[in-house]
Structures are given as C-alpha cells and as structure tokens.
Amino acid sequence: MRSADTEFVGGPLDGQVLPILLSPFHGVPKVYRVPVPAHGDVPAQTLRYVRAKEYDAKGRSRWRYEYAPPLE
C-alpha cells in the first residue's frame, strides 16, 4: 500500500511527520485516531486529529492533521 508523509499540528504529536496509509483513491482519512494506553494513574484515551488542507508557497495543496480536543 502507498503512504504519504503527513504533518501533525497541535497536541502531543505537534511538529511530527508520520507516514499515513492512503485510501484506494490516494487520499488520507478525514480523522486519524491515536490510541494511548493507560499509564500510572492516567486512564487510556484516544487522541483525535482532523484532516486540514495546507498550501505551500507555490499554491499547491497538501493534507495535514490538526489536533481536535477530546469529545466529552
């Protein structure tokens, strides 16, 4: 399967670029969830990142993920 290096903005993954598997039509998922296991007194949680379009200096677009606060 193909993957694309995708930037993460905000939250614990801020500034990291990770390879994300692409769909059959070469798109990244709308929502990317990262499970975080329980650690000490902190319960397990799931981080949510939402897809957002970003433009470079030449006007070309690409996808990145922005942190979305947990749903309560």
Image: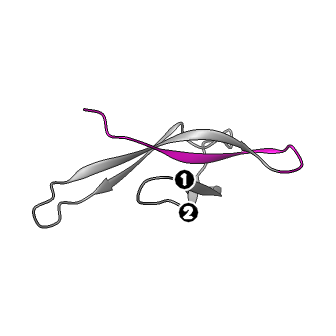
Residue 5, picture quadrant = bottom right
In the picture, residue 27 is in which quadrant? top right
Q: Which residue is mark 1?
A: 9
- CB within 8 Å, label 1 to label 2: yes
* Rendering coords of residue 6 (x, y %): 62, 55
Judge by depth and name the residue closer to the eye, 51 or 58: 58
Residue range of the region highlighted in magenta in the rendering: 57-72
The C terminus appears in which quarter of the rendering? top left
Regarding mark 2 in the picture, which secondary structure is present there? loop
Location of mark 2 (residue) = 15
Q: In the image, is 45 to the left or to the right of 32?
A: left
Residue 35 sits above or below residue 66 on the image: below
* Residue farthest along the top direction in this orientation: 72
| Rendered view: 9 above or below 26 | below
Asked whether residue 71 is drawn in magenta, I would say yes
- Give the farthest residue toward the left: 41
Please report whichever mark, 1 or 2, sits nearer to the chain's N-terminal start: 1
Q: Position of residue 22 (x, y in %)?
A: 61, 48
Q: CA distance from mark 1 to mark 2?
A: 6 Å
> At numbered mark 1, what does the secondary structure look like: helix, strand or loop?
strand
How many neighbours does mark 2 have within 10 angstroms: few (below 14), some (14-19), or many (20 or more)? few
Quadrant of the rendering where the N terminus is positioned: bottom right
Q: Residue at x 54, y 64 (%)?
A: 16
Queried whether the magenta region covers residue 13, the answer comes back as no
Q: Amino acid at mark 2?
A: Gly
Residue 54 image point, x, y percent = 71, 44
Where's residue 65, x and y in %? 55, 47
